[in-house]
Structure formats: structure tokens, C-alpha cells
Image (spheres, rainbow, N blue to C red):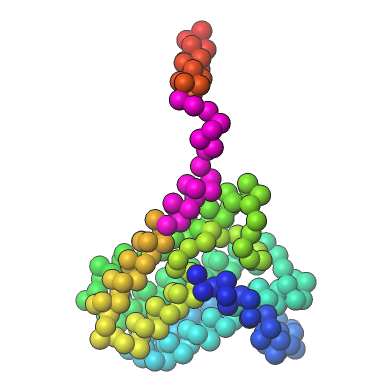
């Protein structure tokens, strides 16, 4: 939800970082991988019972994640592989942090397991809806290299959830279930949106014509 607002102002603030990437001779893929490695470092810190360090490293990694696409477009290096690598390592980073939390707080295994389960459904529904929206030539909502369907829980919300987990561990029995509920709501809401955007036009065929088509198909098979 908040990702769209962030994408509006990140390009205006990313100038110094883009110049730094250029000076280092990095490609956008280097930025993407660096962000992922920082996320792994954040997860390691959490697993080793250093949640504040983990939270700080996580947000540094998200700065890299938020500027790799901006750098790619500004430098004329945008590619389909870059978009693929970005979403792949994003999901790996999200999953790594959940696994780290499961190590740090093993008494909440049900919540951590459900988070990973709903992450699978969230990314599957986002990719499927984005692809089918593109197939139907519906207007995109952003300029990302890989189109994703809109949803309640996206990257920004995930970062906020992780920060709350790490800075207020005494609230984990509540906040983890709340995040699971938000993820589940995201999947349901996206499915409802998909049904509205992608469902058949109810006026194109009535029940009688559908029945007739099915009957004709059955008769042709018998012949």
C-alpha cells in the first residue's frame, strides 16, 4: 500500500546514491545483490539475539532494494533479468528474516510457519494478477520492471512489521498474529480484485447459450 507513495519520492532523493554506484562502477544487479547480502546480515544478527542491529541492517538493505530500479532506469541499464533478480532476492530476504525470527523466538512457530505460507500465496497472487492485468492491457500502477498486482501488504508494510517485531519483542504474541491476519487479508482482497478485473463479462453469454455450447461439444465428441 505505502510502496506507491515511496516510489514517488525515492527518485528525487536517490541522486547521491546513484552517483556513488556509478563511481564504484556498479551495475543495478550489484546493488540488488548487495541489498540481499545486507538483508542476510540482518537476519543473522536477529538469529544471534541482536534485534536492534538486525533492524538497522534491514533498513539499510531496503535502501539498496529501493534504489536499484531507479539506478537501472537512470543509467539505461534496465533489464528483464534485473526485474527477475530483484523479486527473487526480495522474497529470499523476507523469508530469511522470518527464519531468523523463528530461531530467536522458537515459541512462536505457528506464526512463523503461517507467515511463510502466506508469503507464498501473496507473491503467487501478485505475480498472477500482474501478468493477467498486462495481458488484458490494463494500465499499470507503477514503472517496475515486473508487474505485480496491488495488495494490502507489500514491501514497505513488511519492513514496518519486522521493525515492530524486533524493537518490541514483548508484543510478539500479538503482532505476529496481526501480521498473519494482514497477509491473509491481502490474499483474499487480491483474489476479490482479480475476480472483478479478470472475470468474464456476465453479459457475453447467458446460461442458455452456455448450456447449448456444452451440449454441442458433447455431441461432437460422440460423433
Is 93 colored magenta in this rendering? no
- Rendered residue at 24%/74% (across/down): 108
Return the residue found at the far front: 203
- Rendered residue at 53%/86% (across/down): 60
Q: Is residue 111 above or below residue 190?
A: below
Residue 35, quarter of the rendered image:
bottom right
Q: Nearer the viewer, residue 34 or 130?
A: 130
Residue 45 point in image, percent of width and height: 40, 87
Residue 178 point in image, percent of width and height: 31, 72
Return the residue found at the far left: 107
Residue 119 point in image, percent of width and height: 41, 64
- Rendered residue at 50%/85% (across/down): 59
Return the residue found at the far top: 223
State left or right for residue 38 relative to residue 73: left
From where the camera sits, is residue 207 visible? yes
Q: Is residue 20 above or below residue 6?
A: below
Total count of labels: 0
Q: Nearer the viewer, residue 133 or 219?
A: 133
From where the camera sits, is residue 34 visible? no
Q: Nearer the viewer, residue 203 or 37?
A: 203
What span is in magenta?
Answer: 189-207
Q: Nearer the viewer, residue 130 or 32?
A: 130
Q: Is residue 119 above or below residue 220?
A: below
Is 199 colored magenta in this rendering? yes
Residue 183 point in image, percent of width and height: 38, 65
- Rendered residue at 46%/90% (across/down): 56
Q: Is residue 190 above or below residue 83?
A: above
Amino acid at each position: 500500500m505505502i510502496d506507491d507513495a515511496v516510489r514517488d519520492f525515492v527518485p528525487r532523493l536517490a541522486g547521491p546514491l546513484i552517483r556513488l554506484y556509478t563511481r564504484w562502477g556498479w551495475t543495478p544487479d550489484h546493488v540488488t545483490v548487495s541489498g540481499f547480502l545486507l538483508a542476510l546480515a540482518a537476519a543473522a544478527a536477529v538469529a544471534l539475539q541482536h534485534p536492534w542491529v538486525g533492524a538497522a541492517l534491514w533498513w539499510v538493505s531496503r535502501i539498496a532494494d529501493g534504489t536499484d530500479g531507479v539506478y537501472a532506469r537512470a543509467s539505461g541499464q534496465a533489464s528483464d533479468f534485473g526485474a527477475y533478480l530483484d523479486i527473487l532476492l526480495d522474497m529470499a530476504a523476507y523469508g530469511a528474516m522470518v527464519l531468523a525470527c523463528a530461531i530467536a523466538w522458537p515459541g512462536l512457530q505457528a506464526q512463523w510457519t503461517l507467515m511463510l505460507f502466506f508469503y507464498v500465496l501473496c507473491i503467487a497472487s501478485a505475480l498472477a494478477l500482474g501478468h493477467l492485468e498486462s495481458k488484458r492491457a490494463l494500465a499499470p500502477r507503477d514503472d517496475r520492471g515486473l508487474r505485480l498486482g496491488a495488495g494490502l501488504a507489500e514491501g514497505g508494510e513488511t519492513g514496518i512489521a519486522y521493525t515492530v517485531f524486533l524493537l518490541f519483542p514483548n508484543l510478539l504474541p500479538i503482532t505476529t498474529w496481526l501480521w498473519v491476519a494482514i497477509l491473509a487479508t491481502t490474499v483474499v482482497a487480491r483474489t476479490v480484485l482479480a475476480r472483478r478485473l479478470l472475470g468474464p463479462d456476465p453479459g457475453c453469454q447467458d446460461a442458455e447459450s452456455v448450456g447449448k455450447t456444452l451440449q454441442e461439444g458433447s455431441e461432437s465428441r460422440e460423433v
